[in-house]
């Protein structure tokens, strides 16, 4: 018979072993799926897939502010991970643009914007072409108007993260980040973070994927605002490749390459990019402003063939649009994947319908703000099936 002290040791060892086994199964289930071939899955959506898709990493910092890598490091990481564009947003400076870094680099378009410090939080300013800042404690509306008047785009950075956005009365702002890779892990519990540290050396892909959850509060803020006006949403990497240690020393982690493969924003343009950096920057910024884009947890699987449209007879209306309600119109969602997925359609923040499979057709029941989310079905022996967020569309507003 075990003595009480020995029994406690056995119990403790059993709990630790169970935690390790459970953690291993969870992290392994978060591993990437094999990507579909470029043409796979297009038959199912051949009638609906319109425009040209470009995958990008938005919100990146270099040594021009608090990043750990040079612009050249960022460009190489973008090229190695197969990105079409990268948006550099150093803090309160557009100097990389003035120094000639903006433009194409062997097929990769580097767009130089900035992250502006304001009285309400951090604001991404894209497509402006000059430095902008808030003048005085009451100057935020004027700043947003200045960005808009210059043809630029204003997006609230990490709106529910470590420095949340606080002024939701500002109607002129174009959008917000729904996912921010530098913020997603910060609300995880101690056991989740401990599990991540234990398995990071062995299963890094699964670890990073496991730290991304549905951004409930950001989605709530977005949909409430979208009831009043069009609002675009993006997924951001907020990549620094730098964890400060002491003095000038830092740890180059997580790498740009790692985060560029974790969260991406796919932008849909009406026509192909031209190869002219100024024209193509304007095309991408305009598409993002319209909401012609969607967020993908790329760490699970690329999603170049995702589509979310409203069908009215022969007319197909893409995400980001606002239309008047008509009887008989339908919403069509396609999400090709190499494994099982669940498509969930939301109306005014609330789930309307969901289905298992790669395609969803549903008749529009009435006015509302509609968006689609796609979940990958992943299971473990101890916890059963789990639905993990993969894609979030922009909205279609039916008025």
Image (tube, grey):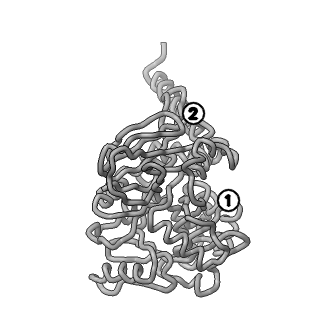
Residue 140 found in image quarter: bottom left
- Left or right of 367 in this view: 43: right
Query: Looking at the image, which is closer to me, 311 or 8?
Result: 311
Task: Tell which tag, 1 or 2, sits nearer the viewer.
Answer: 1
- Residue found at x 37% / y 60%: 322
Vertical side of 138 occupied by 209: above or below: above
- Residue found at x 40% / y 66%: 175
- Left or right of 315 in this view: 104: right
Query: Looking at the image, which is closer to me, 207 or 225?
Result: 225
Query: Looking at the image, which is closer to me, 325 or 266?
Result: 325
Q: Position of residue 283 (x, y in %)?
A: 55, 72
Q: Name the residue beneath numbered marker 2.
A: 25
Q: Quadrant of the C terminus?
A: bottom left
Question: Where residue 81 is drawn, which disc sits there?
Answer: 1
Q: Secondary structure at mark 1?
A: loop
Residue 182 shows up from this direction: no
Q: Earlier in the sequence, mark 1 or mark 2?
A: 2
Residue at the limit of the structure toward the top, as seen here: 1
Residue at the limit of the structure toward the front, as seen here: 313
């Amino acid at each position: 018979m075990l003595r009480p002290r020995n029994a406690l040791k056995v119990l403790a060892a059993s709990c630790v072993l169970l935690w390790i086994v459970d953690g291993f199964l969870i992290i392994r289930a978060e591993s990437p799926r094999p990507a579909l071939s470029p043409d796979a899955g297009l038959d199912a959506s051949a009638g609906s897939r319109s425009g040209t898709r470009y995958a990008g990493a938005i919100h990146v910092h270099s040594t021009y502010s608090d990043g750990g890598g040079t612009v050249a490091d960022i460009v190489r990481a973008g090229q190695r991970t197969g990105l079409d564009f990268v948006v550099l947003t150093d803090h309160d400076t557009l100097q990389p643009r003035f120094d000639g870094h903006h433009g194409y680099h062997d097929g990769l378009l580097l767009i130089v914007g900035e992250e502006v410090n304001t009285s309400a939080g951090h604001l991404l300013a894209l497509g402006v072409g000059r430095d902008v800042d808030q003048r005085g404690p009451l100057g935020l509306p004027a700043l947003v108007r200045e960005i808009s008047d210059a043809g630029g785009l204003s997006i609230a950075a990490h709106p529910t993260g470590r420095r949340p956005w606080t002024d939701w009365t500002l109607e002129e702002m174009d959008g917000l980040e729904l996912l921010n890779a530098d913020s997603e892990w910060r609300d995880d519990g101690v056991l989740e973070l401990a599990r991540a540290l234990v398995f990071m050396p062995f299963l890094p892909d699964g670890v990073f994927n496991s730290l991304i959850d549905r951004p409930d509060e950001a989605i709530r803020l977005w949909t409430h605002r979208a009831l009043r006006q069009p609002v675009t949403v993006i997924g951001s990497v907020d990549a620094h490749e730098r964890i400060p240690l002491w003095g000038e020393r830092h740890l180059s982690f997580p790498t740009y390459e790692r985060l560029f493969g974790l969260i991406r924003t796919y932008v849909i343009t009406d026509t192909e990019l031209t190869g002219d950096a100024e024209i193509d920057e304007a095309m991408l910024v305009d598409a993002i402003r319209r909401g012609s884009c969607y967020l993908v947890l790329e760490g699970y699987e690329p999603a170049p063939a995702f589509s979310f449209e409203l069908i009215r007879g022969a007319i197909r209306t893409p995400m980001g649009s606002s239309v008047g309600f008509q009887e008989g119109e339908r919403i069509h969602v396609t999400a090709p994947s190499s494994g099982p997925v669940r498509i969930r359609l939301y109306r005014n923040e609330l789930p309307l319908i969901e289905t298992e499979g790669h395609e969803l057709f549903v008749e529009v029941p009435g006015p509302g703000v509609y968006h689609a989310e796609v979940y990958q079905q992943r299971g473990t022996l101890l916890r059963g099936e789990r639905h993990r967020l993969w894609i979030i569309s922009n909205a279609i507003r039916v008025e």
